[in-house]
Amino acid sequence: MAKDEPGANIAELIRPLRVKPGSRVNLARDFDPAYKLAGLTKKESAGLLRTGIAMLADYQARLAAQDTYGVLVCLQALDAGGKDGTIRHVMSGVNPQGVQVSSFKVPSAEELDHDYLWRYARRLPARGDIAIFNRSHYEEVLVVRVHPDNLDREKLPPACKGKGVWERRYREINDWERYLTDNGIKVVKLFLNLSREEQRVRFLKRIDLPEKNWKFSAADARERERWDDYQVAFSQMLSATSTAWAPWYVIPADRKWFARICAAAVIAQTLIDIDPHYPQLGKEERRQLLEVKAELEAQAPKGAPADPFAARSRVSAP
Ligand code: ATP
Ligand code: MG
């Protein structure tokens, strides 16, 4: 893409965030949670985000009209990583009819009675839609791995939960995402990468401000104690499941404003790549439309223009 083409800046912005398929990720070494584009200020970022949001709205309208591709956005983060705010801001311009957000919590009894991908499969986007997973099937190789008692609750046959279970899940997830991609459902994976210190600050804010208290739970503090285990689980998951068809993007999350721009950019890039178009009518359909147009024009009351819309907007008659 030429440097001045629309989308060139987006491609440049997200390139350093992409986890190269096949690479071995060490989160702490490879991705800085405080990274931002050199020279970009928070002030300038507001305009940039507005542009991104407008772009998403336009592309989503075309995605829905074309009705061929669906987009699945998977959001993963540690607690206080900013998933909710990212969804709120980035999707603020799109038509709510075309977007479904699903939040995945501790599985219910009914969900535990099924294979582990079942509950995620039920929330996949239809063609033309964008589905956002607030937490996703990746919890199955993250929280379930860090706390293996979760695996016991999943009622697997004994032979299916021994050694190699995580490698097997990586493979199953990759295969599932490949199947989806091959069938027109594009998978976008965003990991909001927060530093330990920034999490501490955000937890304190949730404790200090009464209106934020509901966002904090003692469980969040307990999970924080397992920080290093999660870093390992995230690193392995990123290494094993960043694929050519569904790569991971590690979003620097210490600055919320920058994280939002990056998230919008990755989703926008997916839509740019899909390049959805409004459907074009065939010759026969077009002829039928013109027939109806002639009938409607003939029904114009006395003194009214035959086609007030065309008269007002000066569209050239077909
Ligand atoms: P918030 O940001 O509002 O706290 P949240 O996504 O953290 O939102 P919670 O209800 O606080 O929502 O937490 C959901 C919990 O469910 C998380 O701790 C998550 O790890 C856990 N969870 C999600 N999927 C699974 C799973 N498959 N097995 C076990 N636990 C899961
Ligand atoms: Mg929580």
Image (cartoon, rainbow, N blue to C red):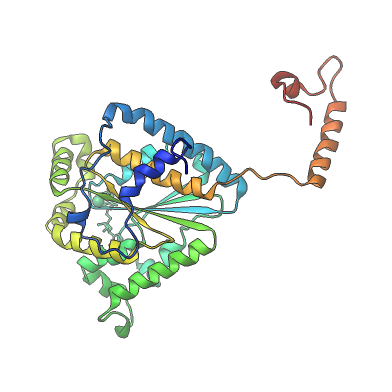
Q: Where is residue 311 in the image (x, y as percent from the top left)?
A: 75, 19
Q: Is residue 197 above or below residue 108?
A: above
Determine the residue located farthest toward the bottom in the rendered image.
159
Figure disc tally? 0
Determine the residue located farthest toward the front in the rendered image.
2
Among the 4 quarters of the image, the one containing residue 228: bottom left
Q: Position of residue 312 (x, y in %)?
A: 71, 19
The structure residue drawn at horizontal position 74% and vertical position 23%, both measured from the top left corner, is 310
Q: Position of residue 52 (x, y in %)?
A: 42, 36
Determine the residue located farthest toward the top in the rendered image.
303
Q: Nearer the viewer, residue 304 or 60?
A: 60
Report ligand 1 position as a quadrant: bottom left
Looking at the rendering, in which quadrant would you find the C terminus? top right
Q: Which of 234 and 113 is in front in this view?
A: 234
Q: In this view, does 55 lie above or below 302?
A: below
The structure residue drawn at horizontal position 18% and vertical position 40%, both measured from the top left corner, is 206
Q: Is residue 242 above or below residue 58?
A: below
Q: Position of residue 69 (x, y in %)?
A: 55, 54
Residue 123 shown left or right of residue 288 in the figure: left
Q: Is residue 310 above or below residue 157?
A: above
